[in-house]
Amino acid sequence: MSGFGEIAVSALICLGAFFLFVGSFGLAKLPDLMRRLHGPTKATTLGIGALLIASMLYFILEDEIVSLHELLITTFLFLTAPVTALMVAKAHILLDKEDQEKLPPTGREVGWSVLDAPQTHEAKKS
Amino acid sequence: MLKTLLPHPLLTLLIVLMWILLSGFSVGSAAFGLILGVAIPRLTSAYWPDRTRIGSPLTIVEYALIVLWDIVVANFQVAYLILFRRGDDLHSQFVTIPLDLRTPEAITALAGTITMTPGTVSASLSADGRALLVHCLETNDPEQTVAGIKSRYESRLQRIFET
């Protein structure tokens, strides 16, 4: 592997590690759950993304094979991370009476689906 | 006939491709991927009755590139907020985004995008599915945040899913 390739891979690994650190640090530092949730959901995007690009680059330069597993990891992360964050947020709203009062109005006749009964498909049609 | 056999042709294609990528290309893995690709959409079709119509691939590529770029930019902003600001000083608040999108797939894509772009997490949907609750880490102008999300992501998703 050429010197330039090594520098590029190392830089990407450092960048990824930095953002993963910031994500975890945010989780520990920020004061309440909704703000803390911002840390880890972000770390998975650019932090893991940079590490995966570094991994692909390494295999292309070192073994001259194009590794596509990283693309799958990215896809699965992008599919699962928002669902986890949504579930944590919903559980928090359901349990935290203080935050429930801070929620803005929906602008609709019904409330938020966490607290209000969801409108069924049939009810919407009629 | 074809509709009962393959309720979601795109999903079938996606599953076959993913299986081959996961297990390496061989006749065996392609055949097993095909079996999964036919079986899974049929088993789950009861929970996903309507077939999604998707706009031109070009609009999807454009959307993906915009989201990726936003993720990179906003990651630096959030990193700055986390490292150099006191947690209690952040102007965090919930905002309501009224939705023009109607199809569940499009709303799911929008909620996922909002969570993956740093600084915002989607937290809930109104009970009738017409408004989205979003938590912002730092915002001084909630209306501008909402307008930004609507013009940047929602209008494009509308072109992808609802044309």
Image (cartoon, coloured by chain):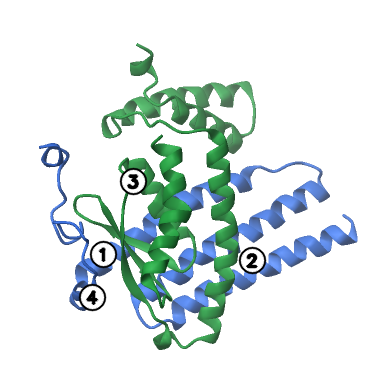
Tag 3 and tag 2, C-beta contact below 8 Å:
no
Q: Residue at 44% of width from left, 24% of height from top?
A: B9
Q: Residue at 64% of width from left, 29% of height from top?
A: B25
Reading the image, the residue beneath label 4 is A102
Tell which residue pokes out farthest to the top in this image: B1
- Residue type marked 4: Lys
Reading the image, the residue beneath label 1 is A91
Could you tell me how far apart the alpha carbons at marks 3 and 2 are, in whole angstroms?
Answer: 34 Å
Q: At numbered mark 2, what does the secondary structure look like: helix, strand or loop?
A: helix
Q: At numbered mark 1, what does the secondary structure look like: helix, strand or loop?
A: helix
Q: Chain of mark 3?
A: B
Q: Colour of chain A?
A: blue
- Residue type marked 1: Ala
Q: Is residue B83 above or below residue A64?
A: below
Q: Are marks 3 and 4 on the same chain?
A: no
Reading the image, the residue beneath label 2 is A16
Q: Are marks 4 and 2 on the same chain?
A: yes
Q: Colour of chain B?
A: green
Crowding near pointer 3: few (<14 within 10 Å), some, many (20+)? some
Of label 4 and label 2, which has the lower sequence position? Answer: 2
